[in-house]
Image (cartoon, rainbow, N blue to C red):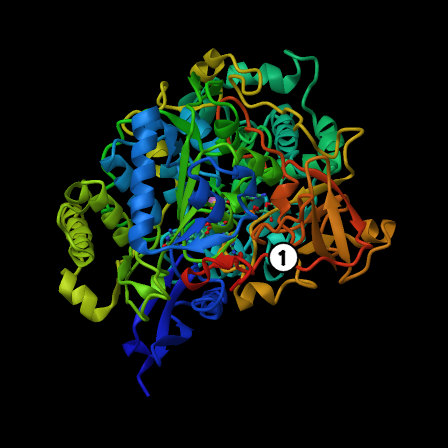
Amino acid sequence: MTRQDDLPLTSSHWGTYRARVGNGRVQELQAFEYDRDPSPIGPGILDVQHGPTRVDAPMVRESWLTGGPGTRTDQRGTDPFVEVSWDKANTLVAQELNRVRKTYGNQAIFGGSYGWASAGRFHHAQSQLKRFLNCIGGFTSSKYTYSFAAAEAMVPHILGSFRDYLDTCTSWDVIRDHTQLFVCFGGVPLKNGQISQGGTGCHVQRDGLLAAGKAGIDFVNISPLKSDVLDDVGGDWLALRPNTDVALMLGLAHTIEMDGLTDRSFLQRYAEGFDAFLPYLMGDTDGTPKTADWAADICEIPADTIRALARRMAAERTMISVSWSLTRQDHGEQPFWMAITLAAMLGQIGLPGGGFGFGYSAMNFIGGNHTIIPGASFPQGQNPVKDFIPVARITDLLMQPGEPFDFDGVRYEYPDTRLVWWAGGNPFHHHQDLNLMRQAWQKPDTIIVNEWCWNPLAKHADIVLPCTTPLERDDMAMTPRDPYVVSMSKLTEPNGQARDDYDIFTDIARTMGVADAFTERRSKADWQRWIYDQTQQNCADQGIEIPPYDQFIKQRWFKLDDPAKPMIMLEGFRADPVANPLATPSGKIEIFCQSVADFGYEDCPGHPVWRAPYEWLGAVDAYPLHLISNQPRDKLHSQLDHGGVSKAKKIAGREPLHIHPYDAAMRGLKDGDIVRLFNDRGACLGGVVIDPGIRTGVVQMSTGAWYDPDENGLCKHGNPNVLTRDKGTSKLGQGPSAHSCLIEVELFTEAPPKVTAHEPPSIIRPNTLNDPEIKT
Ligand SMILES: Nc1nc2c(c(=O)[nH]1)N[C@H]1C(S)=C(S)[C@@H](COP(=O)(O)OP(=O)(O)OC[C@H]3O[C@@H](n4cnc5c(=O)[nH]c(N)nc54)[C@H](O)[C@@H]3O)O[C@H]1N2
Ligand SMILES: Nc1nc2c(c(=O)[nH]1)N[C@H]1C(S)=C(S)[C@@H](COP(=O)(O)OP(=O)(O)OC[C@H]3O[C@@H](n4cnc5c(=O)[nH]c(N)nc54)[C@H](O)[C@@H]3O)O[C@H]1N2
Ligand SMILES: [Mo]
């Protein structure tokens, strides 16, 4: 038997695994021996690496193939597909790209293609697509992420950068040794710490949390879900009304100010504009003092609890963690701004264990303490097209060509989109109001998708180019957010006619006469060595030593040494704000921000404010239940939803819906019932899980179930994005606001329709071309 540490490695966003290969297939994925808390998600790929859910050949939607671009776009998602050869697919794609760019210009190609794709530095699908499109004159792009777009736009105004403060969150060891009170808005959901984008070597969140709990730190879980803090860590659970965190923070701030606990010397030295915020807090500007009683009415946490918490926060070393989910709600710019303001008032920013952090356990790397590798990327080239959308405005882009939109202080215009190309993301997973998006999806002439599985994105395309999975190619997992660098081995031959994204684009580039520009005459192996060599050079410049490429390949992995000094966010700024200013106009934390005020946005003024969301439990005449569509525990987004690990969690084949016993009783529901979730935007089915660990009036259905609409738009499987609203967080960030969503739930009394989400579409194979009735 081969020793485990001799087995080849593969890496994924959810972990690193050793592979046992036999009979040409991966038989088993075993957790990497240095991973202290491996994720069970990984082996889920083995069930679907081969088989009917794989796209096994290039496919073209029948109406598009017979009628040309723009034909029967209303049948995207229902038309059968026709298998074609790679040559034919390349020719069709090249011809169509030429038609679109010559007739309409390159801005008519949308290549924003948001999504997580797979781990692996070289075979990163978006980079591959964008580099290719840049070689043919560019494309309309997208800006920021679904994860926290509102913060990506907002926080740089306040702190000078957002990303820098994700990478420098105070580390768990410092928290363990110094923090006394850990106040977490949105909890510290361990389920999310399974993931780190680009690859995870060792999971650290559970150890970090348990050590903090053992050290006697009190956790306060401010969340509608009890499970957002591990039971073993303990602490208080304040089940606030969703989307009211800013009101609660204002109530805390008001108490701190009234009790004379505001750290004025900190504010003077390190912050700008507290004086402009204070009249709002006190109610001088709008007649509403933001007292604990005022906050209690909104968030439904008792005023005495708020006051007591405020006093403790001022008296003890307090870490404030704000979950990324708080940005994905209406006015999602405000919670981070207000949390920073609250932390500034407490004056502990830059001290060990105090201040704020963005989303502990939102991913595995937050609160880790490791050397950040200056990893090189596969270069994307330059995009000559300046048009872009804020990432979550995809439906508006398709529906409203020529219309203006506001974004971060500037007014732009949506271009007219004729061709959409997606590689490595799944808008039928990530976008809101999917029934509306499906209508918008009918607008372009052509939709091209690189996918490995027949998910709803592939089913709604005109041309599907089948790509490989990471198990079928060599690559390396190397991310600044993880200390492990892993050589990913090709473990099995590509399924069917699947090809690496690089090969797909190389051949189309060749057909279009730009092969050399795309490849720079490098093979896949050359590029991987090139990326590594560049990285080694970058490392050398920073005094970090890593092994030469051939040695790396031989030894399969290495770990960078942890930094000698633990991470304390903004330590240098606190020590000397003049020598280490923030990259803001004042060099300080901007509690009032003149440039934001100058934008003149009613929905995002110059200092943090409470604004009621467009729908929430505090509004009358709305649907009665708040839906939390959070990240799934048993998969990453929609990836591997069709694998065994995810399928085992379904209830009668549908996505679980968590509901409080009281709300269930009111509706006559019991465990295992099939229910219909609905509002004015759409409806889906789900399977009931009765859960006392959820606030009354709130229900929870994770994202990730593959969209499976029937002829009336009912998602039979349980994709909550048929219910969420498609509206930007504000004119400033234009982020997605999925976490502001009200619905009703009722028992589904009809015969449950068959779930078809994981079935391939009808496919017409070459030898059956004359007989479309024959389906495979
Ligand atoms: N309601 C609601 N909606 C949400 C959220 C929420 O909290 N609530 N969260 C949002 C967030 S934070 C995010 S990040 C998004 C995530 O949304 P996405 O990142 O779009 O979701 P994924 O399912 O990870 O999509 C990745 C796709 O890439 C494909 N893929 C994998 N490897 C490869 C490859 O090598 N090549 C190619 N060509 N394709 C590949 C996969 O099959 C999959 O279809 O969802 C957002 N949507
Ligand atoms: N297993 C797994 N892990 C993942 C992912 C995945 O798909 N699967 N996705 C990864 C990605 S791309 C991202 S961006 C991160 C996202 O990380 P988060 O943004 O933290 O993800 P969520 O799970 O949506 O939200 C965390 C919790 O916030 C709470 N919450 C929701 N609304 C409110 C509110 O208004 N107030 C308060 N106080 N709490 C609220 C919910 O109870 C929810 O469980 O997760 C990453 N980790
Ligand atoms: Mo995300």
Q: Give SS at disc 1.
A: loop
* Image height of 57 relative to 512, above or below: below
In terms of depth relative to the viewer, which is nearer, 109 or 46?
109
Indicate the amino acid at tag 1: Gly
Q: Which residue is mark 1?
A: 234
In terms of depth relative to the viewer, which is nearer, 429 or 754?
754
Q: Residue furthest bottom?
A: 1
In terms of depth relative to the viewer, which is nearer, 13 or 80?
80
In terms of depth relative to the viewer, which is nearer, 54 or 345?
54
Residue 350 visible from this viewpoint? yes
Q: Residue at x 52, y 61 (%)?
A: 210
- 497 on left or right of 217: left
Q: Where does residue 683 sit, x and y in percent of width and height? A: 70, 44
Residue 563 visible from this viewpoint? no
- 744 on left or right of 349: right
Q: Quadrant of the N terminus?
A: bottom left
